[in-house]
Image (tube, rainbow, N blue to C red):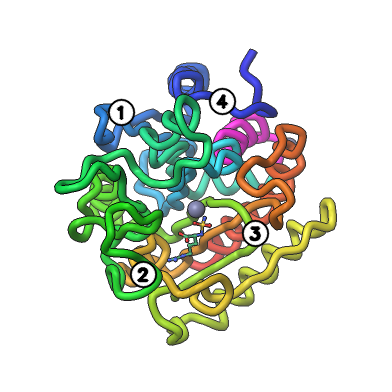
Amino acid sequence: GYSYEKYNSWEKISEWAESMATENPTLVTKTQIGQTFEGRHMVLLKLGKNTGFAKPAIFMDCGIHAREWISPAFCQWFVKEAVTSYGSDPAMTSLLNNMDVFVLPVFNIDGYVYTWTRDRMWRKTRSKNSGTTCVGTDPNRNFDAGWCTVGASKQPCSETYCGSRVESEIEVKAVADFIRKNRSIIKAYLTIHSYSQLLLFPYSYTTDLAAHHSELLDIARSASNALYSLYGTRYTSGPGAVTIYPAAGGSDDWAYDLGIKYSFTFELRDEGRFGFLLPESQIKPTCEETMLAVKYIATYVQEHN
Ligand code: 0X9
Ligand code: ZN
Ligand code: ZN
């Protein structure tokens, strides 16, 4: 069977997404929001009980950065937990009865494939840049949020290249278009990265505090406490610019400025011992503790919209 405690190739994840939808037709719907630069289908799973009414929603993506393998592993884990605990776990049951959760299991599929086949430490997309042999743009510098003003590079060879223009990356455009189209129902935006054990919220493109700073800080701290309660893993909460570093063009800031108040970036385990090369033995504990934080935020959003 499928292993949630191993890192899975894109081929496996893609087959898995298909089977999740066919095996759970009342809870999971598979759609495509676009194609990648290399022509792969960007698969989106919608989790939620069909009520016949338009429900408020949460959008969560994994794998914006190719080498952060624990991130797609978490999205798979979340979907598995949703389908296995719906009907028995009161929090998950209530969440999926009252809201839809859109899960993008791998955002940067071409980059993810490249980390499996050529370079385990690849970060960016795999799009071609004109006038250079350097490949790719940092998708988390390519959103329309203070684009390329700070913590990003105009050099295509840089790991934090912001791209030739806002949404130059076809994958970024696909996600931004989907969220814009569904902006009236999307109440929360969660984006999963690694590593450093941080729970970040806007802003990163400026050191100005977000209008909802104190509410977001309260939520992030409570979610981190929930996470800590399982295995004692410590997270730091705060706005991106002062908690990690100033960096413009990120999806979290863009979603927030679009009006999605509950916008959070997770930086999962660890703190640097293994970094991006987190051993498979840590997938289960990392995902189980992260579930508690995500469920805390989801429950909060359910009660406040
Ligand atoms: O730099 C990033 O994109 C994220 N860290 S990572 O090590 N996964 O690359 C942090 C993103 C924080 N949010 C924004 N910069 N908007
Ligand atoms: Zn990242
Ligand atoms: Zn579990």
What residue is disc 1 on?
Answer: 41
Give the amino acid type for the residue marked by disc 4 in the picture.
Asn
Q: Using residue 22 as the reference point, say whether residue 85 is left or right of it.
A: right
In this view of the protein, which residue sits in the foreground, 297 or 302? 297
Quick check: marks 4 and 2 in contact, CB under 8 Å? no
The magenta stretch is 74-89
Q: Give the Cα distance between marks 1 and 2.
A: 27 Å
Q: Is mark 3 within 8 Å of ligand 1?
A: yes
Q: Is residue 81 magenta?
A: yes
Q: Using residue 246 as the reference point, say whether residue 128 is left or right of it.
A: left
What residue is disc 3 on?
Answer: 196
Residue 26 position within the rendered picture, expressed as x and y whole percent measured from the top left: 47, 27
What residue is disc 2 on?
Answer: 248
Residue 68 seen in this snapshot = yes
Residue drawn at point x = 40 percent, y = 70 percent: 151
Q: Using residue 220 as the reference point, say whether residue 59 is left or right of it.
A: left
What residue is disc 4 on?
Answer: 8
